[in-house]
Image (cartoon, rainbow, N blue to C red):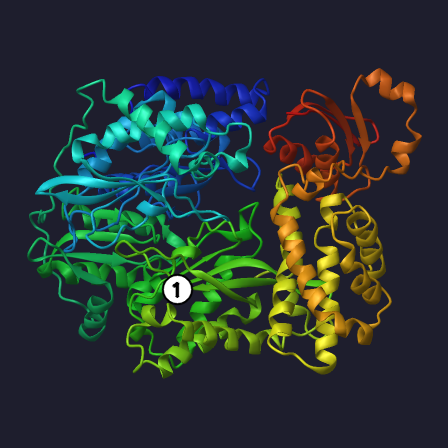
Amino acid sequence: MRFFQLPPQLPADLDLFETQVADYQKGSLPAVKFKGLRVAHGLYEQRQEGTFMVRLRCPGGALTPAQLEKAAMVSARYGAETLAVTTRGGIQLSFVKLGDLIAVVRELVSVGLSGRAGGGNTVRNLIAPHDSGVATDEVFDISPYLFALTSRMVAEPDSLDLPRKFKIGFSGKKNDPAKTKLSCLGFWAKENEGRRGFEVWVAGGTGSSVKPGHLLLDWIPDHRVYYVTKALKRMFDQHGNRRQRSKAKIKWLYEKLGKEEFERLFFRFYALEQQEPGLELKLEPVKNEAQVAAGLAVESPQDEAAFGRWKQRNLKAQSQPGLWQVRVPLLHGNLKNEEAQALAKLAGSFGPNSLRLSTEQNLYLRNIPETHLGNIFNLVSRLESTGLSNRPALLGNMVTCTGAHTCALGMTLSRPAVVEVQKALLASDLDLDALGDLKIYSSGCPNACGNNHTGDIGFFGKTGKLGQDLYPAYMVQIGTKMEGAEMQLARRIESVAAKDLPAFTVAFLKGWQNKRPLWPKIQDYLNSDEAVADLLAVAGKFNATVPTIEANEDYYKDWSDSNRFTLLKGRKAECSAGLFDMIEVDFETIRESTKLLEAGLKGESRKKELYRLVSSAAHCLLVTRGIEAFSDQEIFDAFLEHFIGAGLVPKLYQQPIELAKGRNLDGLDPWAGEVIALGEFMKKLYDSMDDSLRFNLEQMAGIEPVAVPQTKAEETVPQTVQAEKKTDGFKDFRGVSCPMNFVKTKIALAAMTSGQTLEVLLDDGQPILNVPESVRLEGHQILSQTQDPAGHWSVMVLKA
């Protein structure tokens, strides 16, 4: 049994890729070009040099026991000791060596598994609820449509070269659109006068800027699924933003065009596609039935009491009478290879259609007769990877991304933090089973790969700040509604230090437990204003006691990390992320101070908070002008010159800045209204900033971008040298650290016109690793990178 068909051209593609790997090993294929080739095969380079992650496509989380067994065997032979379930219901193998990639890919293809289009700007793994086809609350089973569409998409060449990733979601649930409204294209099953069809949603998206989707079509007959998909894909291919990666997704295309123009374009493409008849999907029925292998003995559970709790926590009746689906929760989605093989062998005893992977990173068995539940219980109770099976359900519903451990964008170590939260919950006197299927999702940064915005409770990594010292922290979100026509993403409420996260979680949930008679269902409580007030109160108590770094240095280290927390630790080619993270730290302080002042803070505390607010307001956007200021005196002087003096900020705010500069806190107190207004004005100014770090106010006033202050090296470069290089601009940023060197480069490019060239001098190490790639991600072209005998680098940039 195969759930989808691999593309017929795949063998030829693999032959070509084998030669490309060989060329890369010989040094005749540049690393940048090889990256573009390998990610389309689902192969990602890992931080450990020379090792790769292999991402496999499992549409709707479906794979056969034989496929799981083969993946585990290949992982054991060539990769890490575990394989992982992803948040799109796929499988990943880790730490595969470059020389083994072709062997790994070919072995997996032999059982119908492939990572083709598993990464890059492609049609990604199609997702659906893990219980599609067996759920009791379905309109109809959407699995045949999802599998057929997958086969069609992976076979089409244009699916491999889109402006950005293209994500498709399905749901057959009556009152649960699942993630169809957060996908580039979503199909939600609906019936119209007894005919099967779908409600169609478009331009949803996750990441640091979550965009709920928009209703495109109230209903289409089911035979139009491919036509809609093809039309939107072609429209995206031709009109998506290929120059600017950060604005390339369909959600940004919708925002750019607006509803009317987006729909006009779509229906034009849709009409063209419908002119070609006979392209309807060829659907194959998916049978969900008992297929118990002959000779499989019925086992009695080894512990009857534990068996009863296990059933309550992990079993759900199927729509097929007498059959059950069984949840097998996995910590972080990890499953040891030998244990995956054991599970695959047992699952194989119930037929080829007995496994699913979920977007919660868990494994599900389906079509299990009640007589054989003891067999499942006995096995998962013995395996280390499935130890959460005998724990309260919410522990198995805790999703997290890899965080800063392996991700270049990660700010915090989210996985160790989740483990500490689980320990605290188990050590508490909370009735964890009463929390039922509560979902706690977390991410190591605002990019939300752990789906924190869709959890009942969500955490995402950020920075906290006490004085000038940064510590790892998490923003807490609550109140998701994903059912029916209503959709509400989790609301950001307040942040807490990473080291306080476990105790905070226990304290907050105890608050609900004490109010349980009023709020029997915790999800209803989390959607209430009362929960928001409770969360603010609990977080406030923890935040009020964050120690200074001198009092407790441990708070300034992340979980499982012995080193002090830094904002850009481990980052590669993400200068823009570092820039905006730095800005966000100040805006978080502005929000916190404003909240305290508006709540009626009095006395000396009020004066100190006013100073804290005005200092953060003055500092927040200095980085966009290429200015590094460390002392308060430097901050206020730079703000007066480059913002008030340049006409970007009204002069009515000059007096509170002057008072703060002189540390006249008594004099600052009567200006509280202006100080709060300054914080609000700086946020509006920031929101007006375009991708070249220009402000709309600046453009309207006709003010040119502020020039980057010259370094000593720039001032002394002979004009003849610049003439010989034949560049339109030259900047020496040696000695300038990340991300400020990127900011200065970006500002210099903003003052140039398209087609001009800029030469930038950079130090070796992080500057040369980060700046060129970040400039490239902005849409500019890197013409060359050369290193001089002293170790410095010259980078030639062609402005887009």
Q: Is residue 466 visible?
A: no
Q: Does residue 106 sit above or below 743 in this rendering?
A: above
Please tell me whether residue 316 is drawn above or below residue 1 in the rendered image. Answer: below
Residue at 20% across, 30% down: 224
Percent coordinates x, y for residue 95 in the rendering: 48, 41
Q: Amino acid at mark 1?
A: Gly
The image shows residue 379 at horizontal and vertical percentages of 24, 59
Residue 398 found in image quarter: bottom left
Q: In the depicted view, which residue is nearer to us: 58 or 385?
A: 58
Which residue has dot 1 on it? Answer: 479
Residue at 73% over, 35% down: 745
| Mark 1 Cα shell of 10 Å, populated few (<14), some (14-19), many (≥20) | many
Asked whether residue 544 appears in the rendered view, the answer is yes
Nearer to us in this view, 348 or 464: 464
x, y percent for residue 319: 11, 54
**Total number of numbered labels?**
1
166 sits left or right of 320 in the view:
right
From the viewer's perspective, tell me whether residue 753 is left or right of residue 199: right
Determine the image quadrant of residue 602.
Answer: bottom right
| Towards the viewer: 546 or 630 | 630
In the rendered view of the protein, which quadrant contains the N terminus?
A: top left
Q: Is residue 643 left or right of residue 476?
A: right
Query: What SS does tag 1 mark?
Result: loop
Rendered location of residue 623, percent (x, y):
73, 48
Judge by depth and name the residue closer to the eye, 471 or 787.
471
Which quadrant does the C terminus fall into? top right
Q: Residue at x 34, y 61 (%)?
A: 397
